[in-house]
Amino acid sequence: MRRSNLVLLALALPMASLSAQIMIGTRRGPDRPAEKPPQAPGIHDVRLYNRYMFSRFSLESSPMLSYMQTTGALVPGVAHDYFAFGDATLISFRAAPSLFVTSAFTASSLGIPFGMNSSDFGIRVKPWTAPRTSVFADARLSWAYTTDFALPSSAVPIAQIYSTAYTDFRTGRGRGTTLGLGSETRITARYSFTAALNYTHYEMRGRTMSNEWDYTSNATRLILGVRYNHGRWLDAP
């Protein structure tokens, strides 16, 4: 009886091995997804929908609060501090995803005994970009102009015309370096809220009808505003 069991076991082992080989050899792989039927004429494939592309240029317009510290602006050797209100406009060009070339124009007039305008040129760096909020750092060269009354940046040359109407008209000009930090939060596809704090030290030269003198001016500016970045839809390939 034991011998017959051994014979049956010896016959069963090859049959089981052959059955396993047949099952492994005939196993089917995963089915490929069926081809998507063609869309009707004039309708884009859902996988090729249009994409939105931003312009390289953007525009910022912001109200501005400035804390001004001057030494010798009105009286030689005497320091004065002022809080001034004004506005700032910044035009930027995206040279790389994290690098922008910027040009800024500011005008401060309310709260100080003279009007001060500046024209800046420099760069803005974003260490990293995010879909919602990103931080940035600004570095710009700045040229400042002062007059006895408020003027927009584009009208500064007109000051030489007005100077003939006054017996003691005071102007000034100088340059400095602007350094600043800020953040940008996207509100919609085209509009973002910006907040920036920057500092500029100016070496100025004042002039009247009969006198010239040197003085310094430090400007700490808080800028809160809106950035607009135009964009357009690109047709899918």
Image (cartoon, rainbow, N blue to C red):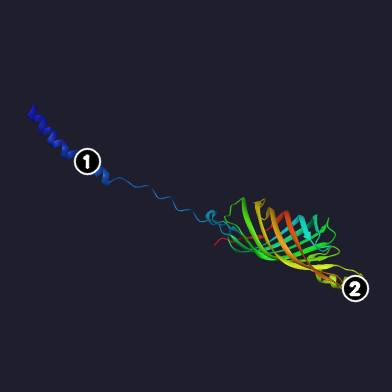
Determine whether 153 is above or below 81 in the image: below
Against 59, residue 9 (above or below) is above
Residue occupying the far top of the picture:
1
Q: Secondary structure at mark 1?
A: helix
Question: In screen coordinates, is 5 left or right of 76?
Answer: left
Q: Which mark is residue 164?
A: 2
Place of residue 58 in the rendered image (x, y in percent of width and height, measured from the top left): 67, 61
Of mark 2 and mark 1, the one earlier in the sequence is: 1
Q: Secondary structure at mark 2?
A: helix
Amino acid beneath label 1:
Ser
Q: Nearer the viewer, residue 217 or 189?
A: 217
Say which of 237 and 210 sits in front: 210
Q: Residue 203's x, y, as percent?
A: 74, 66
User: In the image, what residue type sits under mark 2?
Assistant: Thr
Whether residue 116 is visible here, answered yes or no, is yes
- Is the Cβ of the residue at disc 2 closer than 8 Å to that at disc 1? no
What percent of the width, then of the height, locates residue 159? 84, 70
Is residue 232 rendered to the left or right of residue 26?
right
> Which quarter of the image is occupied by the N terminus?
top left
Residue 139 position (above or below residue 26): below
Q: Is 220 in front, or is 132?
A: 220
> Residue at the spot x=83%, y=68% of the render?
171
Residue at which label 1 appears:
19
Tell me where residue 216 sits by quadrant.
Answer: bottom right
Report how many numbered discs are placed on residues in the image: 2
In three-dimensional space, the C-alpha distance between marks 2 and 1, rounded to whole angstroms, equals 111 Å
